[in-house]
Amino acid sequence: MREARQRRDPADSPLAAPPRLSTAVGRFVLGSLAAVLVVVVGGFFALRTVTIDEAKRGTRELVQAQGRLVEEAGLTDAVLRLEPAAVARLDKLVQDQVARGSVARVKMKARDGTILYSDEPALIGMRFEIEQEEQELFETGGVEVELSDLSEPEHRYERSAGELLEAYTPIRTPNGTPVLFEIYERLSSVNASAERLLGALAPPLLGGLLVLLIFQVPLAWQMARGLQRGHREREGLLTNAVEASSQERRRIASDLHDGIVQDLAGVAFGLAPLVADADRRGSAAEATALRGAISRLRQGVRDLRTLLVEIHPPSLETTGLEPALNDLLSPLVSENITTELHMDDSAASGNGSDALVYRVAREAVRNAFAHGAPQKVCIDVTHPREGVTRLVVTDDGRGFAPEERERRAGEGHVGLTLLESLVTQARGRLDIRSQPGQGTTVKLEVPAT
Ligand SMILES: Nc1ncnc2c1ncn2[C@@H]1O[C@H](COP(=O)(O)OP(=O)(O)OP(=O)(O)O)[C@@H](O)[C@H]1O
Ligand SMILES: [Mg+2]
């Protein structure tokens, strides 16, 4: 069977406080600044990708043009044998016409990976493994461009040049031997272009966002203030409603007390001598009828006084919480329901939460009596920890399912719902647990002020 655990999140309550004005606007501004940051950082990386693609296209064309130049003007078969004179001739051509501007390194590799030439002399004659794609270029021709992985040993002399794009293409020596011609181009210019583009785009973009922000901050401010005003109004209405209802109860209680209760008590008092008179006259039937009437009148007065306690509870400040709770339980005793009331000594001493504790206890006891048909009802008031008052009302009645409560609330029976609002307002917690056939427990925890 499903347990009807009916504690509600205070945030769901209509009385949950809205965020503070500065917090709400601060959150809005922070959110907008985060969006601006995403636009700037995301924009930079997007532009960088576009610029790198653009740079790759440029490097591709450059390696092809310079490969042709070297093939026609500087490459001899003697370079394949690393002959110093041939290498020196090639070097002069490279230094004069190739290794300039953004080109940071030039290399030429044989098919087995031996470096036949580089403008870094230390590399000449060294051998590095040739990657699969480079091998394929020897067969297919064409150009390959990629970002250099500077951690590779082959690139140890290029590390100081920063990020590099490497491009390679096969060229041929006069006797037809293919060699791989490679140039490395600096990428610093790519970042600079991305920054330039972003610099051009940023002012209108950021300006637009700023204008949006300037228009929206007052709106956010107004909305937050509207929420707070609404919250204050709801609080005020609830307080007025509670106050108005207790004023009305006070008025009815005082009218009853001063009017009919006094009159009936007076009539009963006035009839008493007539009984003695009838007895003296020996009129037994009259005396019995009068006794019956007096006793019914006194019972009526007692019932009315019980009703008065119901309508307008005794002032908690003067009589204290314990007698007030005892009074709540007394109508149950007369219905042969077992009742128990436990109170911590500290809880009995009275504090600012007594009114709410009484209010919750009254609704819980009334509900148990009206809906639960219990055999036993218990009230416990304790101070489980410093600054907290706890009230637990349990009954062993028929219990209820959440659907039943929802259905009844739809018909205007909102006793428990109103309690939840009051408790949330007092920054307390109300926990209502019930299950059909298993009784009901209402637990309140509230700051003891
Ligand atoms: N102790 C209980 N035992 C059995 N059923 C209960 C108990 N407490 C509440 N209920 C069920 O939950 C419903 C809602 O209770 P709630 O106090 O909100 O409204 P109500 O008592 O019906 O009407 P109101 O309190 O507005 O006069 C009740 O109608 C009843 O069906
Ligand atoms: Mg009720």
Image (cartoon, rainbow, N blue to C red):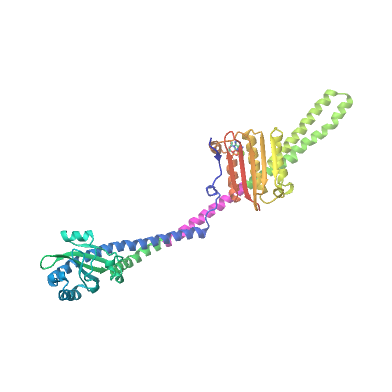
Q: Position of residue 368 (x, y in %)?
A: 63, 36
Q: Taking 299 as reference, is 133 above or below it? A: below
Q: Position of residue 232 (x, y in %)?
A: 56, 53
Q: Taking 211 as reference, is 315 above or below it? A: above
In front: 311, or 88?
A: 88
Q: Taking 228 as reference, is 63 above or below it? A: below
Which corner quadrant of the image does residue 92 belong to? bottom left
In front: 60, or 50?
A: 60
Q: Residue at x 62, y 37 (%)?
A: 367
Question: Which residues fall within the magenta stretch?
Answer: 213-241
Residue 222: within the magenta? yes
In front: 429, or 158?
A: 158
Residue 368: within the magenta? no
Could you tell me what secondary structure mostly forms the magenta stretch? helix
Q: Using the rendered image of the protein, determine whether residue 328 is visible from the camera's viewpoint.
A: no
Q: Residue at x 67, y 35 (%)?
A: 376
The answer to whether 123 appears left or right of 309 in the picture is left
Q: Using the rendered image of the protein, determine whether residue 270 is visible from the camera's viewpoint.
A: yes
Q: Most extreme residue toward the right, as rendered?
A: 280
Q: Position of residue 273 (x, y in %)?
A: 85, 32
The answer to whether 214 appears left or right of 342 in the picture is left
Which corner quadrant of the image does residue 307 belong to? top right
Q: Residue at x 33, y 63 (%)?
A: 44
